[in-house]
Structure formats: C-alpha cells, structure tokens
Image (cartoon, helix red, strand yellow):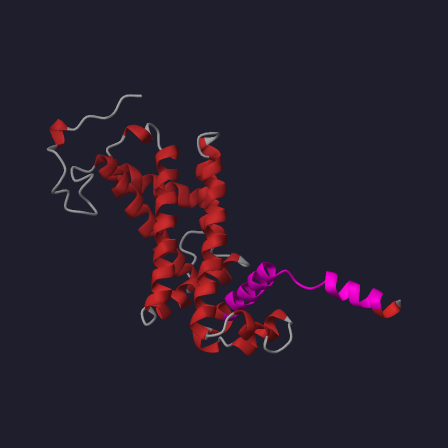
Amino acid sequence: MTGRYTAGIQKRRKPNPDQRRRELCDAAIQLLADDGAKGLSHLKVDARAAVPDGTTSFYFRTRSALLRAVAERMVELDLAALQSVADRAGLDDAASASTLAKLVIQSGEEPQLSRTKARYELTMQATRDPELAATLQRATDAFTKLHHDILVQLLPHGAELDPAVVDDLSNVTLTFINGLLLRFVHGDRIIDSPEQLDGVLSAVVTGILRSEQQGRLTHDGASLPPRGKRTAPSR
C-alpha cells in the first residue's frame, strides 16, 4: 500500500511538459543575461533550473532548438506585457500612456533587465542562425503591430491620422525605445522615470506631427497622394 501511495504521489507530481519547457527557457534567459550566449549550454540550464542532468536536452535536442524556444518564450512574455497596455488603452488614455512608459522603464530594472540583456544576446546569435532570425522577426512584427495599435488608441484623434503618419510615429518612437533599452543594458540610465520618458516621447510625437515631412520620415512616401489632397476619415 505504501509503495503504491508513494508512486501515486510521484505520478501526480510529474511536471507538465509545457510548464517544464517554460521553466527551462526562463533559466536559459537568466543564463544568457548573466554569461552571454557563449555561457549557454544544456547542462548549465539543467543546473540553473535545478533539474536532473539531461532534462534540457530531452526537451530541446539541439542548441539551436533551445535558442529558438527561448526566443519564443521571450516573445510570449513581452507581448503579454504590452497587451496589458493595449487592454487599458481607450479606457483611460492617460493611465495607458503612463503604463507604457512604466513598462519601458522597468525593462531597465531587474528582473526585467535580465530579459532585455538576453534579447540582445539572441539578436546577435540570429545574425548567424536564419531560423532564429525568423523567430525573432515574427516577434518583431507582432510587437511592432501592437505598438502601432496602442499609439492609435493613445493619440488624440489617432484613428483619424493618415496611416503613413502613424507609421512614422510608430517607427520613430519604437526605434527610440529600442535605443533606450540598449543603453539600459550598458548601465546608462539616461532616462530614469516613466514621467521623463512620457515627456520625451510626447516631444518626439509633437515634432513629427509638425514636420512638413510627416508620413515620409521613415519611407519615401512615393505612393502617397500630394499633401493637400489628403483627407482624414470621419468618425
């Protein structure tokens, strides 16, 4: 009876495969942040995750498979965080804008800073791994679209803006945010609060909206109609 009881407990405690993959990927993210891509191995992930040797290689047969899984896990975490901002947009625009800025600032602080560092490590690896590059590109596309949609919801009359102008706003602000995150990785806290970031992004947006080249700043705008012939859609 005791043997069957013990076996039953062990069976019930057997880890869910999806949960185990997430735990291994989270351990790998921390390793990438601490030791860089060269410090990542299956056995080191086993040790960091406190699982038996061979567990990581069972779930991810190759190093490339592990890296791709880590990239997908980071995408999952990043998009979930950004989606929380999108869900607030339209309900309380001021709170949503502040939440977006807070999310960026937190990316420069632990525990999120480790994920930021790991993301840049993966980006460098992707230059030599086409499959990893494809995974990261899908993440970039999804992240860019969500960022774009949040901007439309947060900006006054955002839905009435020329789509090319919104593209400029999205491309420039996202490029600034990416550059800011890179400085965070290097320990450079040039911007240290959500309020400060809100002010900078507001100034960027204002500058773009006042520019004669709005709608053409991040592409040539060759397919766009002359400025005087554009009309904003009515609500």
Task: Please state which of residues 5 and 39 is positioned toward the viewer in this rendering.
Answer: 5
Determine the image quadrant of residue 198: top left
Q: Is 44 situated above or below 101?
A: below
Q: Is residue 12 magenta?
A: yes
Q: Residue at x 37, y 70 (%)?
A: 125
The dominant secondary structure in magenta is: helix
Tell me if residue 194 can be seen. Answer: no
Give residue 129's quadrant in the image.
Answer: bottom left
Q: Which residue does the image show at 35% across and 48% down from the upper left? A: 144
- Foreground residue, 126 or 55? 55
Q: Can residue 32 be spotted in the picture?
A: yes
The residue lying furthest to the top in this view is 235
Q: Residue at x 12, y 34 (%)?
A: 225
Task: Name the spot of residue 145 as percent of width and height, x first.
Answer: 35, 45
Q: Can residue 63 be found in the magenta stretch? A: no
Quadrant assignment for the C terminus: top left
Image position of 231 (left or right of 65): left
State how many labels appear: 0
Q: Up-down: is 141 above or below 21?
A: above
| x, y percent for residue 150 | 39, 39
Q: Which residues are magenta?
A: 4-31
- Residue 132 found in image quarter: bottom left
Assign the N terminus to one quadrant of the image: bottom right
Q: Of residues 223 and 15, which is closer to you in this image?
A: 15
The single residue placed furthest to the right in the displayed view is 1
Please name the residue shown 48% across and 60% down the image. Answer: 115
Give the image location of residue 25, x and y in percent: 53, 64
